Image (tube, rainbow, N blue to C red):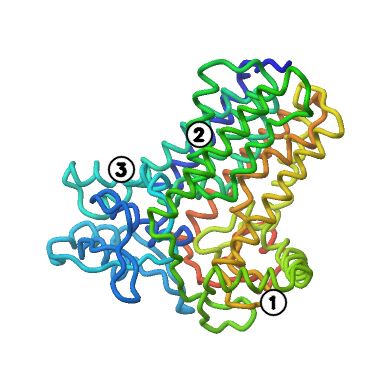
Amino acid sequence: MAIAAPWSRLERIVFLAICLATLFFAILTPPFQAPDENQHYMKALALSQGHVVTEVHGDRIGAELPRAAVDLHAVDFPTEPDGKRHRYDKAMIDRAWSADAARPGTRFAEFPNVASYAPTLYAPGAVGLAIGDALGLPRIGAFYAGRIANALTALLLLAAALRLIPFGRMALLGTALLPTFCYQIGSLSPDAVINGVGFLGLALALRIGFMAPDRASTAATLVTTPLLALAKGVYLPLMAAGLRWPSRASLLRNALILSAMLLGAVIFAVWMKANGGSQALYHITSRKTGESVLTAPLAQQLAVILADPTGYARILASSIIERAPVYALQIVGRFGWNAILLPLLAYPLALLMLGSAVLSGSGVRFGLGQRLWWLAIALGTALLIETAMYLTGTPLGADYVQGTQGRYFLPLLPLVLLALMPADPLRGARLLCAGAGLTLLIIAMLSAWDSFWVHGFVTADGMPPHSSIGRALLLPSPRW
């Protein structure tokens, strides 16, 4: 039976650094410079104004919102790639701060990419936006209030997960030290709730499975699991991490976890039905041809898979192999709309940090079967993520998967690290993990500041060209 160890001083320092880095990104990152943050902002704002279910106006999906809010993105801080260098300055914030009075009335705002997302994902940001409105802040002021509320919610969920996980706390801390984690939860992205609830769900599942369940942890599991399902249904299998080989002692715990998972699946299905059960199609830029294409209707794309499962397996394998290096870069840190790479030396530094997190040890001995089970859950969930993107974010019948980003795998990473952890820590591994992680965060913060506010950047996918290996290794990609 595992017993949760008290926090060490080093772990508290690391958690504080994660908090500071997150708030730094929330304030420093220009508006809408997290992926799809413009649509997430509109969705959160709609929720703050009472629009729980999105509206359909002909072929447009969204909500009627204040024109000043819509123009905050459309006029003040547009994000469409135009091949030009963009550099932000304080004058842009000042102009947006005083622009609302000249933008009366409302306008229909479209956010088809996120139309079917559950309101629970946007509740923290919506609360922050409502607080900003109540304080009389302009739209841009309320925008930052929404970001901070979102960030604080994610950090509270992370703190709860760190307190509840019965072993392997460094697996959570190592993942949270990644710049992508801090950057995303410091935005209006629902990643704040997805990552936070994902970590909490994993911690509770392990606590139920490996410690004597009490009323508090049981109740928390029955609440958290549906929230995890509503975050994105593909993450629900993470709760199976707490399942153990059948024995008289584990039957009740397994039944509790499975019941919670069933409850989550039912609530997710009920939400999809209440939301109309319809899928919002949207245009994307094909990563194969560069042309604008329409995503496929789910039923038709599912028919493609069922007609040739072996062919789909080949598509899945080839897409994963082709995109794996991109996922690795995005998991560590690629800012803006996947436009800004960190100095290339930051990526092996991240690998050193994660490796030393593994060598920090879990403090508990597990058999090979348990470790393989955790890896199977992580792999299966990753394949579900890819399949979900093929069904809802890829052109009909395409021979590739479109739209998957490395950050989607962050909730799975702690489980992978746990599966690899030895029972006993390697001497100095925790200190090395903390040192590498803190160095990585400092590099990331300096890179964001320089790329957004000093040097500027060009929105472009792929590896930017470089004229010097030294510059590529030591400077963020806009400096190459």
The span from disc 2 to disc 1 (Cα, nearest Å) is 36 Å
Q: Which mark is residue 224?
A: 2
* Label 2 crowd bin: few (<14), some (14–19), many (20+), radius 10 Å: many
Choose between 96 and 370: the one closer to the eye: 370
Circle 1 is placed at which residue position?
399
The span from disc 3 to disc 2 (Cα, nearest Å) is 22 Å
> Quarter-wise, where is residue 286 in the image?
bottom right
**Closer to the camera: disc 3 or disc 1?**
1
Q: Earlier in the sequence, mark 2 or mark 1?
A: 2
Q: Position of residue 163 (x, y in %)?
A: 56, 23
Q: Residue at x 66, y 44 (%)?
A: 412
> Quarter-wise, where is residue 291 in the image?
bottom right
Q: Quadrant of the N terminus?
A: top right
Q: Earlier in the sequence, mark 3 or mark 1?
A: 3
Q: Earlier in the sequence, mark 3 or mark 2?
A: 3
Q: Tell whether label 1 touches label 2 (CB within 8 Å).
A: no
Q: Quadrant of the C terminus?
A: bottom right
Circle 3 is placed at which residue position?
128
Q: Residue at x 54, y 29 (%)?
A: 221
Q: Position of residue 152 (x, y in %)?
A: 41, 36
In this rendering, the answer to whether 103 lies above or below 227 is below
**Identity of the amino acid at label 3?**
Gly
Q: Position of residue 185 (x, y in %)?
A: 48, 45
In this rendering, the answer to whether 312 lies above or below 271 is below
Q: Which mark is residue 168?
A: none
SS class, disc 2: helix
Q: Residue at x 46, y 31 (%)?
A: 156
**Identity of the amino acid at label 2?**
Thr
Q: Decide if residue 455 is on the left or right side of residue 142.
A: right
SS class, disc 3: helix
* Label 1 crowd bin: few (<14), some (14–19), many (20+), radius 10 Å: some
The span from disc 3 to disc 1 (Cα, nearest Å) is 42 Å
